[in-house]
């Protein structure tokens, strides 16, 4: 049963209702935060269409994965962190690299980390670690050697007495499993 006035409903309650499938509750979260998230994206990218796309993609992703996403602190902090991750992925794309080469002379705003953003980052880190622990042990060790220890495929193969192709296959499988658990935009 929905409250008559969702505008007075706290974020945590709206998120709980959205996780249960309430589109009006999710719509209220969208109305509360889309503009703030858009401004966050715009001031990092200076690209209105890209900023709009990023915010839309974050909201779509969160709706699609709502049953898996555990927000333990602040809903807005989680959304801001998700937008930051999406911005980073955007910046990695070839199109963005070309654009930023052209705009290299423009001064970018300094990125600050508010307490709520730090909490959201901690939530995301905890989710990553939890998903990492779900990997089979050998796969997890190979993945950690690659990502945490910075070893090349050849170095990992030599260390574990495996073929390079086996290491590549295991790393690919690990990424696939982590993406399934965390969502594509966190690891791309």
Image (tube, rainbow, N blue to C red):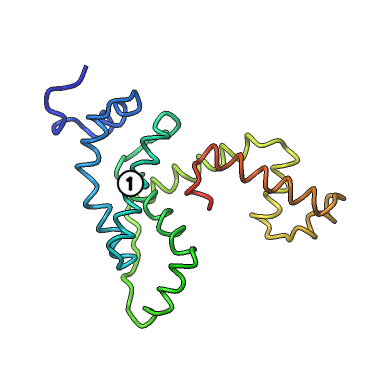
Outermost residue on the top side: it is 1
Viewer-proximal residue, 48 or 4? 48
Whole-percent x, y for residue 140 in the image: 69, 42
Q: State left or right for residue 163 relative to residue 24.
A: right
**Which residue shows up at 23% across the image and 46% down it?**
33
Q: Residue at x 45, y 46 (%)?
A: 122
Q: Position of residue 27 (x, y in %)?
A: 23, 35
Q: Position of residue 130 (x, y in %)?
A: 56, 37
Q: Is residue 127 above or below residue 20?
A: below
Residue 113 percent across, percent down from the top left: 35, 58
In this view of the protein, which residue sits in the foreground, 116 or 9? 9
Where, by quadrant of the figure, is residue 2 drawn?
top left
Q: Residue furthest right?
A: 161
Please give left or right for residue 135 compared with residue 78 in the image.
Answer: right
Q: Residues within 10 Å of mark 1 (few under 14, many from 20)?
A: many
Of the 4 image quadrants, the one containing the N terminus is: top left
Q: Total label count?
A: 1
Image position of 120 with respect to 97: above or below: above
**Label 1: which secondary element:** helix
Dividing the picture into quadrants, the one containing residue 141 is: top right
The residue labelled by disc 1 is: 77
């Amino acid at each position: 049963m929905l409250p008559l006035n969702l505008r007075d409903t706290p974020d945590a309650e709206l998120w709980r209702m959205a996780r249960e499938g309430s589109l009006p509750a999710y719509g209220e979260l969208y109305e509360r935060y889309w503009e703030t998230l858009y401004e966050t994206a715009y001031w990092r990218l200076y690209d209105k269409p890209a900023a709009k796309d990023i915010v839309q993609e974050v909201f779509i992703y969160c709706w699609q994965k709502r049953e898996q996403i555990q927000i333990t602190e602040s809903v807005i902090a989680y959304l801001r962190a998700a937008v930051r991750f999406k911005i980073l992925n955007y910046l990695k794309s070839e199109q963005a690299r070309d654009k930023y080469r052209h705009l290299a002379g423009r001064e970018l705003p300094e990125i600050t980390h508010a307490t709520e953003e730090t909490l959201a980052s901690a939530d995301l880190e905890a989710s990553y670690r939890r998903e990492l622990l779900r990997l089979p042990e050998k796969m997890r060790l190979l993945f950690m050697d690659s990502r945490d220890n910075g070893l090349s495929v050849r170095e990992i193969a030599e260390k574990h007495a495996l073929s390079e192709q086996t290491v590549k296959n295991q790393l690919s499988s690990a990424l696939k499993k982590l993406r399934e658990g965390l969502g594509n935009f966190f690891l791309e």
